[in-house]
Image: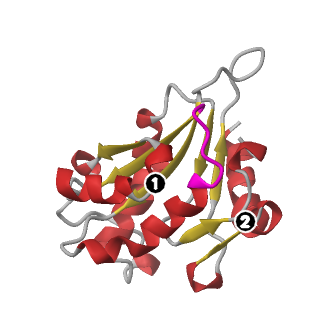
Amino acid sequence: VLVLVALLIVFILVVGTAAVGGSCGWGRVRTLVLLRRSAGGPVPPRNKAIVVLTRGYKDKAQYKQLIARNTHLEKYANSDIDYIIFHEGNIDQDHQHYISNFTPKLKITFVDVSKDFRTATMEFYQPTASFNMGYRNMCSFWFVEFWKYVTSYSYILRIDEDCLYYSDPTQVL
């Protein structure tokens, strides 16, 4: 099963955004669809989520990419989908309101995942020595820690903050 999930992730990383209509920063496809089937029958309403991991900024203007992403998603807002923004504990209430006010139809939930981020160094595979701690934390979050936050969902669509989704996400959820 894990091999199939890994193959699905690689496939979607390579062709996913092109197939469903979107674009990402740096010309790379970085939309990731993670699917988990519910046991028997159709997926119940509100058992789907669109998620992102983002950082907090001191200047609200730095949320421009995230807000643009959310604005594209709001075009197809669906009350049966949860919109979750995971963050490193550094998006305060004022900034959360600022972000949410641009897309009121999304009903965004902010989740502090700072307890899953390491501040000290860790052992790593030597050829990856150039990757900084922030990148290592992000990878660890998506491939290890993330799952405990989404146990109640059958379908998850990850759309990074520098990605704009031009299609109706319910077509893939």
**Residue 104 place in picture, x, y as percent:** 44, 48
Nearer-N-terminus badge (1/2): 2
What's the residue at 70%, 28% (across, down)? 37
What's the residue at 23%, 57% (across, down)? 91
Looking at the image, residue 171 sits to the left or right of residue 97; the answer is right
Q: Disc 2 residue type?
A: Thr
- The answer, for residue 40, to whether it is visible in the render is yes
Nearest to viewer (mark 1 / mark 2) = 1
Which label belongs to residue 103?
1
- Magenta segment: does it hold 77? yes
Query: How far apart are the two marked residues, 1 and 2, measured between alpha carbons?
Result: 22 Å
Say above or below: 18 vs 96.
Answer: below
Q: Which residues are magenta?
A: 74-80
Q: Disc 1 residue type?
A: Thr
Q: Which residue is mark 2?
A: 17
**Residue 137 place in picture, x, y as percent:** 34, 61
Element under disc 2: helix
Q: Quadrant of the N terminus?
A: top right
Which label belongs to residue 64?
none
**Residue 109 place in picture, x, y as percent:** 38, 41
Looking at the image, residue 137 sits to the left or right of residue 168; the answer is left
Q: Residue reaching furthest right?
A: 19
